[in-house]
Image (cartoon, rainbow, N blue to C red):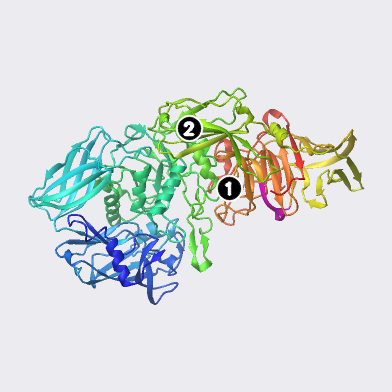
Amino acid sequence: MIILRSQSILTLLSILLCLNLYAQPTVNTQRQYLSGIDKDHTIPWDFFCTKGRNSGKWTTIPVPSNWELQGFGEYTYGRGVKKIGEQGLYKYTFTTSKEWRGKKIFIVFEGSMTDTEVKVNGKLAGPIHQGGFYQFKYDVSGLIKPGAANLLEVKVSKISANESIYHAESDGDFWAMGGIFRPVYLEVKPASYIDRVAIDAEADGSFRMDVYTGNVSANHTVDVQVQELNGEKEGDVFSNQVTAKQNIVSITNVFPGVKLWSPEDPNLYEAIVSLKDKRGVVHTIRQRFGFRTVEVRKHDGIYVNGARIIFKGVNRHSFWPESGRTLSKEISLLDVNLIKDMNMNAVRMSHYPPDQHFLDVCDSLGLFVLDELTGWQAKYDTEAGRKLVKELVVRDVNHPSIVLWANGNEGGWNTALDDDFPKYDIQQRFVYHPWEKFRGTDTKHYPDYNYVTNSVLYGNEIYFPTEFMHGLYDGGHAAGLDDFWSAMLSHPFGAGGFLWSFHDEGVVRHDRQDSIDTNSNSAPDGIVGPHREKEGSFFAVKEIWSPVYIGVKSLPSDFDGSIPVENRYSYTNLDKCNFRWKLVSLASPHTNDTGEKIDSEGKSQTISLAPGTKGFLKVSLPAHWRNSDVLYLTASDPHKREIFTWSWPLKSPAEFIQKVLPALAVQTVQAQETSAMLTVTSGDTQYIFDKATGYLEKVIEKGTTISLSKGPVQAGVTHKLKQFNHRKEGSQYIVEPIYEGETMFTVKWTFASDKSAKLDYSYSQKGEADFMGISFKYPEDKITGMKWLGQGPYRVWKNRLKGMQFGIWEKKYNNTVTGESWDYPEFKGYHAKLYWVNVISKEAPFTIYTENENTFLQMLKPLRPKGAYNEFNNPPFPEGDISFLQAIAPIGTKFQDAKVMGPQSQKNIMMNYTPISGTLWFDFGTKNP
């Protein structure tokens, strides 16, 4: 944060921030910032906090800011918290140009939480403004002293005196912050001026504009020139005459062949609007807009530019840990790019209008926006609500990204306000109620899978849940989304949905040693963390919502380079996309290398595939392609943004073992036993077995103990040792405990004179199971990391298998609990498509290989989140620490057990009563990488 302190520098900054205040022709609106422009560029004002931290004394505070983050008042989460109700008193002295005499001067507040009283030179600028998330302004032409020093005094009450505003804004499921958190500036216009414009530009090129003016007469005309952002003019200037005392001038035109706006191709135009009198131009403003048409067709769907759209969206709060709701355009760019990187095309403004720069970025980079009147679960009263609806729509009306208005949230809608939106919206956008069946839409929040399937079968409304797959901790989001999305795409009136939510809403607590606070389980709901750290769901959503959809799990033995592909874009033909492939050979686990050797690479043939159609992408591979280990295919969109990279191993685990399993010098294998233990010695390695259980109890490699023990056991199943068999067979030694119990379970260790230790196992499974496989114990406090070949780098759940890439990965140990700490990727958990794992420890490293496809590695067990109030986000794990599994557990959401979240979220069963067999190889001579 940059805080400018000397008055001379403040004056200079104000001048610089005026957008060339004194250099511009006077026909343009002039702007003089009284505050800074964002969280990183602030200006100190005098400040007095009435209660809480650092209260009762005059000091300074950077503006804009939330005062809690500057050490004042009280941190308060919204709902159910008793608040002290502090106030902030601000003072700031500024100087204006003497050239402003006779001008129209407004003071603009882009956001102040909550009730805001404004005085200029000791006089009230107007009525106290109530409503924290809305832009408001006062005409202070008669209060400002041009060319002289002026005193601005502002009193901000964190808790609104209007009870309905308090409950709608400060008693919700989000942080309640106080202060002037968005910029404050003076807007200076000529005596006769353009206040604002509202534009309706349709996909057929028709253009309609309402020009709101002040102090005009019949001697004035309005001219409009439309142009592209590069300055290329679209048609000629067109005009309309002002009639006497007319404060709204309507003007129309038609522009054939314009470039349309959509998230896939966000073309923008600019209208240069000039107010003229007989002497020439009096005032000019510029307004960006886009040509596009939005239709909500009952019993059908939502259409933009004639194409039915599917929202692939997420809910976003306006928040940053160190600055609260005071943000910057850089954060808006970061967030929009992250959202688009997940192949999303939409964002819902939960639960209030965002910063203007966020909407600007949505316009320019391309996202559908659902803009929202605040009201978490309580509504504004009608009088207050009508003012705030107007402020919302008037500010945001011209953004082509905004396609729908939301009146409140989850019961926080005042139905008397529904018809106020179109009063100010020239485009007459549809107004919906998030969570409710309303006007032919069903936006049910947090449906389970059965609700979705019933809606597909019986629903008559346009279906798009505006909150679903609640992402508390590591649950929800992509976990179950694959099933939900398949069902939702089959809905005859489906329009997609919005995940909850984009980021963990964590705030830096200066009163708690600068820790990040998400108010326990209230706000760690994001696909990314407070500083936008990516969770595993980020990548799974990216694959599931890829507009280039490839569902191939593995390549067939007769693969000829043809890959089935579906175009899930709304507007873009796949011939506009780019496809590149590469063949890669992977390093051995015995090296320090986690990289790859590119054997060959190239560009795929162009495929012409219209939206909504399927076909085959041809990848022309060289003749020797099977010699490589992995095929990667990367798709990029017309704007060069990566869509997704798919990966397919070209060798089975058994084939890969033949390539990388180290050959050992011939060595004698021998066994020694006591009444309790059997020790098998192979070269420098000793394997110690407990004769009472049949378990491996430890391994000693060149005198170093490796504490792999208590296994193998069948995960989740109880067996008792019936007989402990061991014998010498030629140059090999066999250890073969015999078990009896709930299921069939066989174990056979083979110690050969020239090979690593081999474990063959087989088991049956009875009924439903959370997981299936075998498990060992290993002390967690001795593990420092792991390197593995498989899918990574993130863990998976049964209902969140997508998004990972096959390759060699390495992670250091961490004890991350998703949403409570943010050292990602998490170390602990299930990892998919294992080929081998090198366990790095304080004892000695060891490598375990599997011969079996679709093997999951369990690496330790994640801690239960401290804030969890049920077990939905705490899936079951085997009792062991290191397990090799053929089936794993799903994860639920904040509100739902996994079992109600679709087919992939069910428990596991043995397929066709066929026992499952596997083979592992153990190499205890690997050096630490």
Q: Position of residue 620 (x, y in %)?
A: 53, 25
Magenta region, residue range: 779-786
Q: Which residue is mark 1?
A: 872
- As shown in the figure, which amino acid type bears the numbered disc 1? Phe
Q: Nearer the viewer, residue 210 or 666?
A: 666
Which numbered marker is on residue 905? none
Residue at 47 percent of width and 55 percent of height? 505
Q: Residues within 10 Å of mark 1 (few under 14, many from 20)?
A: many
Which numbered marker is on residue 579? 2
**Relative to 133, does residue 887 appear above or below in the rendering?**
above
Q: Is residue 882 part of the magenta span, yes or no?
A: no
Element under disc 1: loop
Asked if residue 290 lies left or right of residue 278, the reply is: right
Q: Is residue 450 visible?
A: no
Label 2 with label 1: CB-CB less than 8 Å: no
**Quadrant position of the N terminus in the picture:** bottom left
Q: Position of residue 108 (x, y in %)?
A: 27, 60
Q: Is residue 628 visible?
A: yes
**Relative to 496, does residue 515 appear above or below in the rendering?**
below
